[in-house]
Amino acid sequence: MATKKIAVIGAGFGGLSAALDLSKAGHEVTIYEGSDHPGGLASGFKAPQWQWSVEKFYHHWFTSDKYMFELFDELGLRSKVIVRTPKTVMFFKGKFYPFDSIPAAILYPGLGWGFNKIRFGLVGVYLRLTNHWQPMETTTVDAWMRKWAGSKVYEEMWQPMLVGKFGERYAPQVNMAWMWARMHARTTSLVNYEGGFQAFADDFAAFLQQRGVKIVYNTRVDSIRGQNGKVELTIAGRPVVYDQALVTVSPAQLAGMAPELQADYLKSLLDLKHLGAVVMVVSLKHQLSREGYYWYNLPKKEGYPFLALVEHTNFMDASHYNNEHIIYCGDYLENDHEYFQLSQDELLQRFLPSFKKINPDFEPDWINQAWLFKANYAQPVPFLNHSRNIPPIETPIPGLYFASMSQVYPWDRGTNFAVEIARRAAGLMLEK
């Protein structure tokens, strides 16, 4: 096989994984990354006094994430993988209750007793066991759950989380296949990496560079067009021609870079709906959750100003962070939401009363430092029959390929499926 010159745009976990397969096949691979580090939306940061990094937008893996575990083994990094089972809680009538095991679900008072809990259990078992998801995309979560789990179970359990995640506008339109995927594949045991996700991205990037992959940071691709069966990238005003190119950024970014794409493909990119993310990371002097809870599912109807509160140091030991206690306050929001305009201090003042609800002893002087992160592209929204809306990996421009989290459906966004679709794209490129 002749050596090809291939560009990968984006050094997230997907772009890195595709570069691994393409370089193993003997091709000359260059990754272009707009920031100064690898990792994409899973990248992290580290305060000077910390040994480990934390993610800007909270991430963890599940023990069922087989594509990540295959990658750990291939890179020889399985020994750095950490598996633990932290406590997740649900809100009911002013209190939080564990909801991360079958016994906890049985004891959870929000479902009452008797038939409702039986229906909840049967629906959960069915969704875990069935692989037949396709008919579910023809109906909404709202309609399917009301029919099979009952309105009481749905309104108590799933509706608040659905509205919290997708908002009042989109929640009623989300299809049931998306919910199936979440309940089918996820586990209560969670996975992290020694040093944090950024440490894994750095290790992965170093592995690729040792194999001869070139990674160019702080560099954005201005435009992409076809040229006699090849792909021309314009970078800092200069054209660079490649035999093939793989784009791993958002659909809107691809549309902006490659306006020469056929009209129907461009439309498929721009018609995809998504939400952004606003996440505040806060370092505290003291543990916030007295009970050691890790993940709080927060109902906005109770006045909480964000979707979830995660106390990371109830999962990973605080000693890695100078014995500071790290919490996340996160939300998925439409891009015109006011949170995207508010400053860090303004948002923190909105969030502080919620800390007091979690722990009445909390005082503002517990805060060491806070960091605010915003991303316009963070959560795809899957409507009815969404599989018809997914743009193909192979674009109409010969040699140009596209792999993003908007194409991993019915699975939810996440690094595990970013790795899978990017490696699938690399396979298609190698076939050519």
Image (cartoon, rainbow, N blue to C red):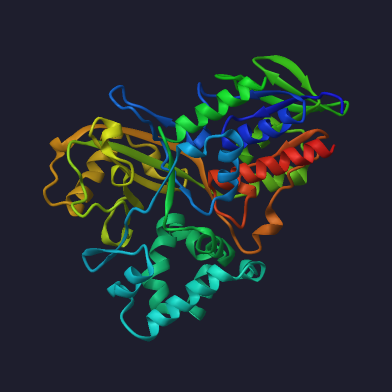
In the displayed structure image, the side of residue 324 where residue 158 appears, left or right: right
Q: Quadrant of residue 389?
A: bottom right
Q: Residue at x 67, y 30 (%)?
A: 19
Q: Is residue 170 visible?
A: yes
Q: Residue at x 44, y 76 (%)?
A: 121
Quadrant location, the C terminus? top right
Quadrant location, the N terminus? top right
Out of 153 and 388, give the one closest to the viewer. 153
Q: Quadrant of residue 266?
A: top right
In the displayed structure image, the side of residue 352 where residue 139 appears, left or right: right
Out of 191 and 279, give the one closest to the viewer. 191
Out of 40 and 257, give the one closest to the viewer. 40
Q: Is residue 382 above or below residue 241?
A: below
What is the tally of numbered marks visible in this picture?
0
Q: Residue at x 39, y 86 (%)?
A: 115
User: Residue 232, how many percent across, how many down?
Assistant: 77, 23
Q: Is residue 395 visible?
A: no
User: Residue 123, how many percent across, how many down?
Assistant: 49, 75
